[in-house]
Image (cartoon, grey):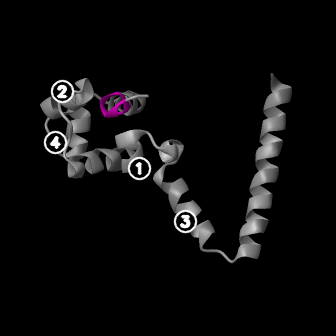
Amino acid sequence: MAHLGERIVQLRKQHGWSQADLAEQAGVSREAIGKYERGEAQPPVQTAKQIADVFEVTLDWMLDGSASASLDRQALQRLEKIQQLPPEERQHLYALMDAFLRDAHTRKAYAS
C-alpha cells in the first residue's frame, strides 16, 4: 500500500506539477513537499488537508488510501445529495446508473 508521500508524488505528476508548483498551490515550502514525498516528515493535519484540497481528493485518501480514494470532491458531493433523496427516488437513480454502467461495460467488452 502506498504511503502518503507516494500518493503526493502520484498526484503531483498526474497534474504535471513540480514540487515548487505544488508548494505554491498548497502554501508550504518546496523543501517540505520534498520531505513529505520522501517520507522523511509527515505534514501536520492542516497541511495535509491543504494538499488534499489542491488535488481535490479527500483527506482520508491522502492519509490512508481509504475506499474513497477514487472519488473526487464532486463525486462525493453528488453521493451525499443522493443519500438525501427519498428512498423511491434514490432507487430510480440507482437503476439509471446501473443501466448506464452495464451498457458502458458491454461497449467496452465488445470493443476489445
- Report which residue position mark 4 lands on: 28
Mark 3: few, some, or many residues within 10 Å (few <14, many ≥20)? few
In the figure, 74 relative to 89: above or below?
above
Q: Nearer the viewer, mark 4 or mark 2?
A: 2
Q: Nearer the viewer, mark 3 or mark 4?
A: 3
Which secondary structure dominates the residues rendered in magenta? helix
Mark 4 closeness class: few <14, some 14–19, many ≥20 residues within 10 Å:
some
Q: Residues within 10 Å of mark 2 (few under 14, many from 20)?
A: few
Front residue of this view, candidates 16 and 43: 43
Snapshot quadrant of residue 63? top left
At 21% from the left and 47% from the top, the residue drawn is 47
User: On residue 40, which mark appears?
Assistant: 2
The magenta segment: 3-7
Mark 1 and mark 3: Cα distance apart in space: 14 Å
Q: Nearer the viewer, residue 33 or 3?
A: 3
Of callouts 4 and 2, which one flags the residue occurring earlier in the amino acid sequence?
4
Q: Residue at label 3?
A: 80
Q: Point out residue 57 in the picture as x, y percentages from the top left corner.
A: 42, 47
* In magenta segment, residue 58: no
Disc assigned to residue 58 = 1
Q: Nearer the viewer, mark 3 or mark 2?
A: 2
